[in-house]
Amino acid sequence: MSEETLEKIIAQQAATIQNLTDEIKLLREQIAYLTQKRYGKSSEQMPPNGQTSLFDEEEPQADDDGDYPRRH
């Protein structure tokens, strides 16, 4: 192979390496963004009282006589 051919191959490989490096950088930024969005501080909000519930329903309220209503 001639020296000119080798220099072209080296230039092509350098360009390919740069393109792949740029793509890796972009993908890492996307991973960081999506990880932050998925698991970041705003993904899980604690209720004001700090208590979590397994169900999205309010706790039963006591009747005037102190008994809790029955669930059917």
Image: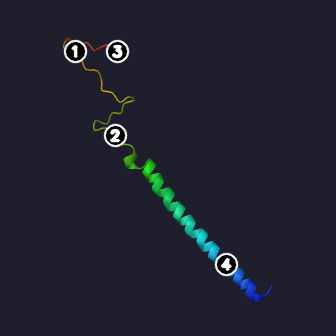
Cα gap from disc 3 to disc 4, whole angstroms: 73 Å
User: Which residue type does callout 4 highlight?
Assistant: Gln
Q: Residue at x 28, y 38 (%)?
A: 48
Dot in front, 4 or 2: 4
The mark found on residue 71 in the picture is: 3
Percent x, y for residue 8?
70, 83
Asked whether disc 2 touches disc 3, contact meaning CB atoms under 8 Å apart, the reply is no
Secondary element type, mark 1: loop
Cα gap from disc 4 to disc 2, whole angstroms: 54 Å
Q: Is residue 45 above or below residue 64?
A: below
User: Which residue type does callout 3 highlight?
Assistant: Arg
Q: Earlier in the sequence, mark 1 or mark 2?
A: 2
Identify residue for label 1.
63
Identify residue for label 4.
12
Q: Residue at x 53, y 61 (%)?
A: 28
The mark found on residue 46 in the picture is: 2
